[in-house]
Amino acid sequence: MVDAKAFEYFLLKPENQDEVAKLIEEDYFPREPLCRGFHVTASASSGMTSRKLRECLASGVSFGARDVSTGALAGVRLSYTKAKAEAGSEKPLGERKTEYEIKVCGLCDEIRSKVNIFEESDAEAILYMFVLCVRENYGGCGIAKKLVQMSIERGKALGCQLVLATVSNMFSSRIFSSLGFKTRYSVDVSTLASDWELDLSAMEGNTAIHIITKSLQ
């Protein structure tokens, strides 16, 4: 295991797009439970994921961790902010074309539609957590939790009153729970498997999806 002191934590910017996309393609999609359940992968360099990635990198609330000895990007916490006034005017991401967009994004959107966070809270601005990814060989160094904490601190400094995340694996659930997140809505996708043609055996027990929040007030 790499020494926890061997990392530089930094604010991600648009110029980090290529290396962040590479990390997500190599270490996020192959391990993400729904991607495994649907037997799909995706590109972070085109389509809906690329557009959301650009939004996160321009947001000022996304952070990365770099191995100082090799210069390798070890992990990222991609986030973005949204004000209540913008909630009804969000531009559509466009027509879904790939299997990932149709299946993974489609199922996640269906689940997220069960929670209208601006109607259910008094928050005027929300920090949305999009992707948390740490390269597998850097696991156990505390990188993921540190990146989440940094994004939360930055979001609060920018005026966000609430943090929202959608979690699909047990490891991330433990991190968010330790930071005081509460569950707003949960679904066991095994109850949806036949409708969505999910291979539950490929998901390694990660069949619960949680929408979770943390107050910053």
Image (cartoon, helix red, strand yellow):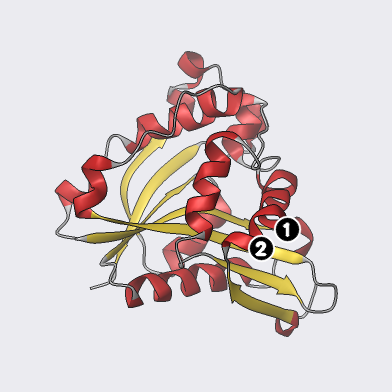
Q: Secondary structure at mark 1?
A: loop
Numbered label attached to residue 90: none
Q: Residue at x 37, y 68 (%)?
A: 180
At 53% from the left and 30% from the top, the residue drawn is: 104
Residue most extreme to the front:
15
Residue holding disc 1: 135
The answer to which of 77 and 186 lies nearer the viewer is 77
Residue 75, labelled with which disc? Answer: 2
Q: Is residue 121 left or right of residue 101?
A: left
Label 2: element kind: strand
C-alpha gap between disc 1 and disc 2: 6 Å
Residue 19 at x, y percent in the picture = 72, 57
Classify the position of the N terminus by image quarter: bottom right
The extreme bottom residue here reads: 5
Q: Is residue 31 above or below residue 105?
A: below
Q: Report crowding for label 1: few under 14, some 14 to 19, many 20 or more residues within 10 A (C-alpha).
A: some
Q: Position of residue 100 (x, y in %)?
A: 58, 28
Along the polypeptide, which appears first: circle 1 or circle 2?
2
Q: Quadrant of residue 6?
A: bottom right
Identify residue type, mark 1: Arg
Tell me where residue 201 appears, x and y as whole percent.
Answer: 65, 28
Residue 37 visible in image: yes
Residue at 50% x, 67% y: name it.
148
Q: Say whether marks 1 and 2 touch (CB < 8 Å).
A: yes
Image coords of residue 14 (percent x, y): 58, 60
Label 2, residues with CA under 10 Å away: few <14, some 14-19, many ≥20: many
Foreground of the two, 94 or 103:
94
